[in-house]
Structure formats: C-alpha cells, structure tokens
Amino acid sequence: MNLRNYLILGSIAAIAALLAASEVMYSTMAAPPDNSGKGNGAGNSNPDDSASTAMLFKLNRKYMDYHDGVFKVKAGVGNGIAPITQFFPQVANIKVGEKVMWYNPTRVGEPHTVSINGFADIAGPFIMSNSSAITPLNATANAAPVIIPAVPGKTVGVVMNARSVEPVVIAANGTVTYLPPNANYTMNGDEKYINSGWIWPQGQTPPGFLNINSFTVQFNKAGVYGYVCEVHPWMTGKVVVR
Ligand SMILES: [Cu+2]
C-alpha cells in the first residue's frame, strides 16, 4: 500500500467523521422532518442524501485554490473506480480583472468542457453530400459512421460538433473565433458563447482530439457567470465577479 492509498483511506475516514458531525448539525439546524404521515417522511433522513451533501461540501472546501488573482477549478475529480463529475469548487468568487483556470485532474480519460453563456451539442446531424460514401480513414478500424434517415436524396451523418470539442468564442455580433488549445481568454462580458473545448487529464487525450488540459478566462466585468459541462450537463458552476 503506497502513500496515496493511505491518503485516500485517510480522507474516507475524514468524510465519515464529517458525516457523523453533519448528522448532528442537520438534526439541530434543519427544518424538522415531516413525520405527520408515518413513512412518508423517510426521505428526510435518508443517509445517502446527507452523505452526498456532506461529501460535496467537504470537497468544495478541500479543493479551494485561489492565489495571486487566479482561482483554480477542478473539472471532475476522483479515481478510475469512482470519478466524480462535478466542478470543485462549484462557485468561484473573484474580483474584476482576476482569472479562473479550469483543469481536469481526473485519473481516467474523462473529458469535460467549460461552456459559458450557451450550449452546443457534442455531436449532431450534418448533410454530407448526395453521393458520398463515408468510410473510416483507418480501413482496419472497428468503426462505421452513423447515418440517419433525414432529407430524401441527402446523406446525413452524425458528426462531432467542433463548437463543443474545440475552444471557441462567439462574439456579440455572431463572429466565431476558434482559440488555441489551453486558451487564455480575456472576456468582454457580452459574448454569446465561450467554450473551453474538451479538457482531458494530462497525458490522456485520445488520438484525434486536441490536446487540451486547461482553460483560463480573465473576467473584466462584474457579474455572475454560470457555466456547464456539455459532456455531463449536470456539471454546473458559476463565477461571481465583484
Ligand atoms: Cu464533464
């Protein structure tokens, strides 16, 4: 057993201790469970619910990393057995002119995006051409294109969407600008869409994808900016700029 395993065991013990403490806090601070209909109020004391809340609370504190005007946010955490698809910390409180840097520390090759002010599907139907035969570039690959019935006389294939996979900004006037991998973008505040592209853990970018490990945005306008991961749309976070 190596040091990392000890650390993991240690943090599990710490979470268990925190759970025990939070049960006490919950029972004293939260509104009393509804026991009027015996059995119907069972959800209020479900140990799984409080375990999840307590663990997220703990991880949000544990992963706070805010130094020298840069607030670092982990896009996903966890290990190969139990990756956690959430942003940590979920809320970044910064000052005007400071930066948020997102990166992916997951130990399995699970991608995440940081998508602000908009959403793009990760893949979608595209018209290829009337007569095209679509074949894999690598003839020996175990692969075939998804062709869907759509417009008569047209071949429609499902293709990955570059507006999700690649770093891109759509300005207020609709101008689309692709950014380099690991982009460091200065935000105006009126953009229609800002996207990190698919952020992979270091060394785990699959062949054919841009090697993106981080995304940094400088926020120059006060406000609250919500964002979402397009691969896991339940992953949300926000940046509060004062
Ligand atoms: Cu994600």
Image: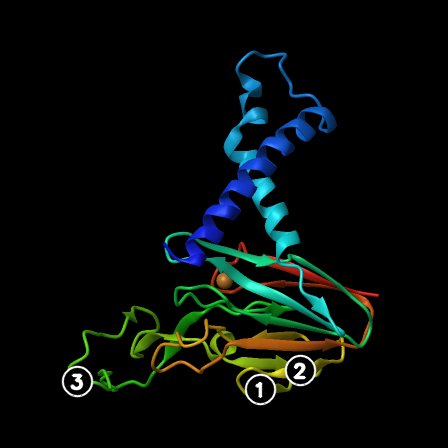
Above-or-below relation of 196 to 78: below
Q: On the rendered image, what quadrant is the N terminus found in?
A: bottom left
Left or right position of 188 against 80: right
- SS class of the residue under badge 2? strand
Q: Are marks 1 and 3 in contact (CB under 8 Å)?
A: no
The residue under label 2 is 185
Q: Amino acid at mark 1?
A: Leu
Residue found 62% across the figure and 81% down from its top = 169
Residue 215 placement (x, y as % from top left): 59, 76
Q: Amino acid at mark 3?
A: Ala
Residue found 15% across the figure and 81% down from its top = 140
Label 1 CB-ligand 1 distance < 8 A: no
Sequence-first tag of 1 and 3? 3
Residue 113 placement (x, y as % from top left): 53, 69
The foreground one among 109 and 159 is 109
The residue under label 3 is 139
Q: Nearer the viewer, mark 2 or mark 3?
A: 2
Which picture quadrant has residue 19? top right
The residue under label 1 is 179
- SS class of the residue under badge 1? loop
Left or right position of 46 against 23: left
